[in-house]
Amino acid sequence: MPSTDSLSITFLGTGTSLGIPVIGCKCKVCTSPDPRNHRTRSSLYVESTQTSFVIDTGPDFRSQCLRENVRKVDAAVYTHPHSDHIMGFDDLRPFCFGDHATMPVYATPECLTQLQKAFGFAFDLANWNPVYLKPVASPVTGPFQIADVHLTPLEVVHGNVRTVGYLLGTDTRRLAAYIPDCKQIPDHTIDLMRGVDTLIIDCLRLQPHWTHMSLEEALAVRDAVKSRQTWLTHISDQLDHATLQAGLAEDVRVAYDGLKLLLS
């Protein structure tokens, strides 16, 4: 468990919107026996001494929680409303059973609007049912706290959908920047991240993509931010884990489902 001024993070998922293996695909990565090549949709579980929360709940969220024995989620935080990041929303229900009656949901106003459209039954108090998820919409318009964890939204460019990453820290330290989906990062966001201990960044494939970062682009962010360590996530079936890792500098690592890090 984390101590004061530290955080524990678990990569619930590190894959793209299709996951790996991709349905019907017989490529080398999709048929690989290496469990690190089996990637569910991207999601991060964060624990401190006072709280536990999740960043994004994709379609694999239920199985991810069962796999990692997640028993406590005090809040849900969202980066953007694409389906591979929100469609496990209703599987937050068990974390509202018992004394924990409501679930704070932190997202940009635009993302909250899409969540309310997709899961209107949960937000509609007039249609309330005791077995429904009980979300409490909490618009993200600037830095905020969940118990002892400080979060700062990081504006990034990801197609035409407003998207943010998050800077995670404590009272005294900026511990990690988590950006699973982006194509470009504005200068003011780079400034917010500069010198952060741990960078977790989108790395879809080797070739350029119109809404996601390539390996070269992800490494350029690492160079600009000057993080102590960098972890690549949101990886497609065009990148084999072992092959990709073998070609990287010592401070750059490839994340995989189930990986746990203690940030201190």
Image (cartoon, rainbow, N blue to C red):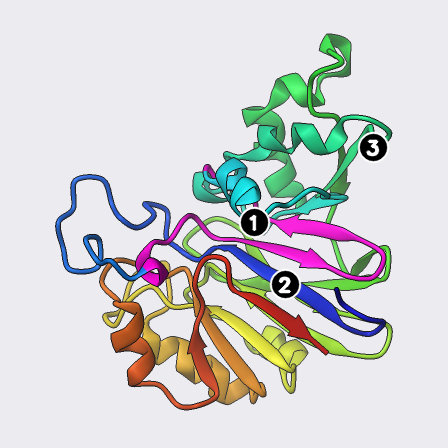
Q: Please tell me whether mark 1 or mark 3 is closer to you in this view.
A: 1
Residue underneath mark 1: 68
Residue 54 magenta-highlighted: yes
Real-space Cα separation, disc 3 to disc 2, in angstroms: 22 Å
Q: Mark 3, residues whose alpha carbon is within 10 Å: few (<14), some, or many (≥20)?
A: few
Q: Percent from the top left, x then y, of residue 105?
A: 71, 40
Residue 114 shows up from this direction: yes
Q: Mark 3: which amino acid? A: His
The answer to whether residue 34 is above or below residue 56 is below
Residue underneath mark 2: 9
Q: Residue at x 62, y 20 (%)?
A: 120
Q: Residue at x 46, y 40 (%)?
A: 60
Q: Mark 2: which amino acid? A: Ile
Local SS, label 3: loop
Residue underneath mark 3: 100
Find residue 33 and report its image quarter.
bottom left
Q: Which residues are magenta?
A: 35-59
The answer to whether residue 115 is above or below residue 28 is above
Q: Residue at x 22, y 53 (%)?
A: 30
Q: Left or right of 136: which side holds 194?
A: left
- CB-based contact (under 8 Å), mark 3 and mark 2: no
- First in sequence: mark 2 vs mark 1: 2
Q: Left or right of 237: which side holds 99?
A: right
Find residue 32 and report its image quarter.
bottom left
